Image: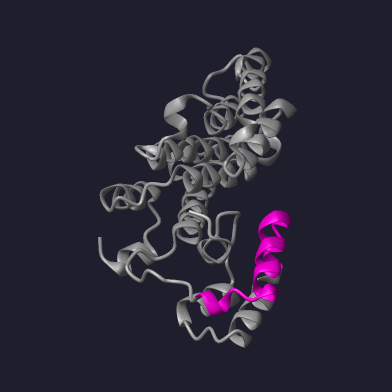
Amino acid sequence: MTEHEWLTAADPEALVEFLDKSGMNSRRKSRLLSCASCYRLDSLLIQPQSLQAVRLAEAWADDEHLANDVRAAWLEAGPARTLAMSHRTDSPEYIAAMAAFDAANPKPNGRSDVGAVWSALSVIDKVIEAIGRASAEARGTDWVNDPATIAEAVAVTSDLRDIFGNPFRPVAIDPAWRTSTVVALARGIYDEKAFDRMPILADALQDAGCDNDNVLSHCRGDGPHVRGCWVVDLLLGKE
C-alpha cells in the first residue's frame, strides 16, 4: 500500500491488512475503533443492554479492572433477545446487536495485540451491513450497493485513520510540547469526547513550540475525531 492509498482508500479491510502486516496491531486502539463504529448504529441497537456493553468495552480499553463488568454486560447483551423480537437473523437490528456483542467480547484473545485489528474488522463489517440493510429496506434496494453502505465504509476508514494516524509519517512527540495546558486540554478532549476543542489544542501546541504540520493540521482539520485519536493519544502517552 502506498501513502496515497492509505489516505484515500474507502475499504477498511485494505487498511486493516496493511496495519496487520506492518505490525501495528493494538488491542486498545482496535477496541476503540469497534466501539466508535457501534455508536453509529444509533436506533438499530433496540436493546439498551447492547449500548451499555459498548460503553463498558470502550471504558475497558483504558481500565483493565473493568474486565468482570464487561463480561457481565457482554452476557446481558447477547443478541438472543433481539432475534426473538425480529425473528430474522438478517434483520438490521439483529446484525447491529451482533456487532455490539462482538465489540464487547471479553474473551482472552480479545485482549491480545495479535489479531486485534482483525477482530475490529469483524465488528466493522457488521456495522456496515446493519446500516446498509436498514437503508436498503427503506429504499427497496440491494444493501451491498446502497448509498448508506458506501457512506459507512467511508466513515469507518476515516475513523481508522484518525485512530492509527499515517503510518508513512510517524510522529514523535517532543516532551516540551506537553505543557500543563496541552495535557489538560488533551485529557479533557479524551475524557469528554470534546473534539470541538481540537483547534484549541492546536493553538496550545503551537504556543508550546510544536511546528509539526501533521499534528497541527490534524487538530485543525474537519475530522472526524473519535476516542483514540492518534494526536491525543500521543500527548497522553497512550498506545
| Residue 158 place in picture, x, y as percent | 49, 59
Whether residue 69 sits left or right of residue 217 in the image: it is: right
Task: Say which residue appears at 65% left-offset and 12% top-offset.
Answer: 84
Is any part of residue 185 visible from this angle? yes
Is residue 191 shown in magenta? yes
As drawn, 23 above or below 229? above
Is any part of residue 47 visible from this angle? no
As drawn, 105 above or below 223? above
In front: 160, or 147? 160
As drawn, 211 above or below 131? below
- Magenta stretch: dominant SS? helix
Q: Quadrant of residue 37?
A: top right
Task: Say which residue appears at 69% left-offset and 77% top-offset.
Answer: 200
Q: Which colour scheme is used?
A: one colour
Q: Quadrant of residue 58?
A: top right
Whether residue 220 sits left or right of residue 172 in the image: it is: right
In front: 163, or 8? 163
Task: Say which residue appears at 67% left-offset and 38% top-offset.
Answer: 55
As drawn, 234 above or below 30? below
| Residue 112 place in picture, x, y as percent | 41, 35
Figure label count: 0
| Residues in magenta, as a range | 175-196
| Residue 229 place in picture, x, y as percent | 55, 60
Is residue 132 shown in magenta? no
Task: Say which residue appears at 40% left-offset and 42% top-offset.
Answer: 117
Quarter of the image that includes the N terminus: bottom left
Whether residue 64 sits left or right of residue 73 in the image: it is: left
In front: 165, or 125? 165
| Residue 119 place in picture, x, y as percent | 42, 35
